[in-house]
Image (cartoon, helix red, strand yellow):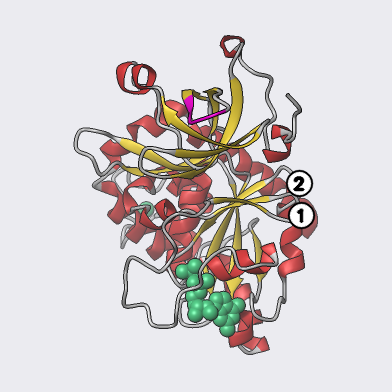
Amino acid sequence: MVNIINLEDYGWEKPLPPAAAGFLPARVTAVHKERYELICGHGQAFGRLKTAVYYGRGEEFPTIGDFVLLQYEPSGDSQIVKTLPRRSFFSRRDPSPGRGEQAVAANFDTVFVMTSLNKDFNVSRLERYLALAWQSGGTPVVILTKSDLAEGVTVQEKAEIAETAFPGVDIISVSAVTGQGLDKLSVYLRPKKTAVFLGSSGVGKSSLLNALAGEDIMDVKAIREDDSRGRHTTTHRQLFMLPSGGMIIDTPGMRELGMWEVSHGLGTAFADIEEVLSRPCRFSDCRHQTEPGCAVKAAIENGELTAERWNSYLNLKRESRFSDDKIAFLRKKQLRHKTLAKWSKQKKKNGEIRK
Ligand code: GDP
Ligand code: ZN
């Protein structure tokens, strides 16, 4: 059969594992209840999980962006027999009782962390999203949306606030209406690269996707947003190939990411604070409040750390503490190690630029 699609164009980069003989690799582009939309060498395909593997042996359920192995069936649904290892992923608590985590998006390179330049602009929410993004294994880029609704000075001002809060992270303001800034996203949307949207409902994800795609592939919500389920059509693709050859994942699952996942990425998002904290305070049980010889207080006094940033850190830490036990799986996967390495690389790069 003629190979009409090269899966490498969809980001496939590894040689197949030995056990893959006879199976066809594919990428998941949408997940419906029990049926998966896929792209493989023969074009679009549909697949169902092989019961013995997924329910019998507990294989990890595939999600949007996953690479899987198929027992290809040209005239009906193929059988999905394996979920291949992920290079990055977001997960949330699985709503079904007794199950731990559930992946909602996988194998992306960049995380577009989105906040709008009008009333939605909120640095602590951005901080929270950044922490999630670092934890996922992708590289975050902050996107300030709806720049047409803000005055030039406001855009500049808010971009600067974000730059101060997130050193080493790219910050780009865009408008889906005027097209301003869209060209700056192209470096993240090069062929074979995948980006995922992370941002509250109404921030402009669907509009941005449509603008990048050059056509309306997503329903944009009406201004009234009383319908909390949103207006996105229920059967649509969730991983899109753009004309640029890059891909975007926009899935409803991303909207349900809870707080519980955050604590793990905290150290990375706040690496500057962790560095301060690694300098010992005079008292080993220092609460960093009024104690003499406190390293945190000293850092705030000499301007190394702003009081706002310290407070965001404390708030985020408080919120995420209750759920620490639920993230043990992440430690196992040593994602922290990976994201920290990425952070220091970014910082080095940044340092060179500033010199
Ligand atoms: P989503 O929920 O994140 O997918 O957000 P939508 O793309 O559905 O957008 C929510 C609302 O914001 C809609 O009314 C859009 O028309 C509006 N919107 C989105 N992007 C822009 C923009 O760049 N400029 C302006 N003025 N409005 C926008
Ligand atoms: Zn202290």
User: Disc count in the image?
Assistant: 2
Q: Position of residue 11 (x, y in %)?
A: 68, 37
What's drawn in magenta, residue-wise?
Answer: 75-79
> Which one is in front, 351 or 330?
330
The residue carrying mark 1 has its beta carbon less than 8 Å from ligand 1: no
Q: Which mark, by number, is residue 91?
A: none
Residue drawn where x is 65% and y is 87% of the image? 153
Label 1 crowd bin: few (<14), some (14–19), many (20+), radius 10 Å: some
User: Is residue 28 shown above or below 167?
Assistant: above
Q: Is residue 325 left or right of residue 202?
A: left
Label 2: which residue? Answer: 191
Q: Report which quarter residue 44 is drawn in.
A: top right
**Is 60 covered by the magenta stretch?**
no
Q: Is residue 341 visible?
A: yes
Q: Position of residue 180 (x, y in %)?
A: 72, 76
**Residue 332: percent from the left, percent from the top?**
41, 26
Q: Is residue 246 left or right of residue 201?
A: right
Q: Are marks 2 and 1 in contact (CB under 8 Å)?
A: yes
Question: Three-letter amino acid code at disc 2?
Answer: Pro
Which residue in the structure is indicated by mark 1?
244
Residue 77 falls inside the magenta stretch: yes
Locate the C terminus and report the quarter of the image it occupies.
bottom right
Element type at mark 1: loop
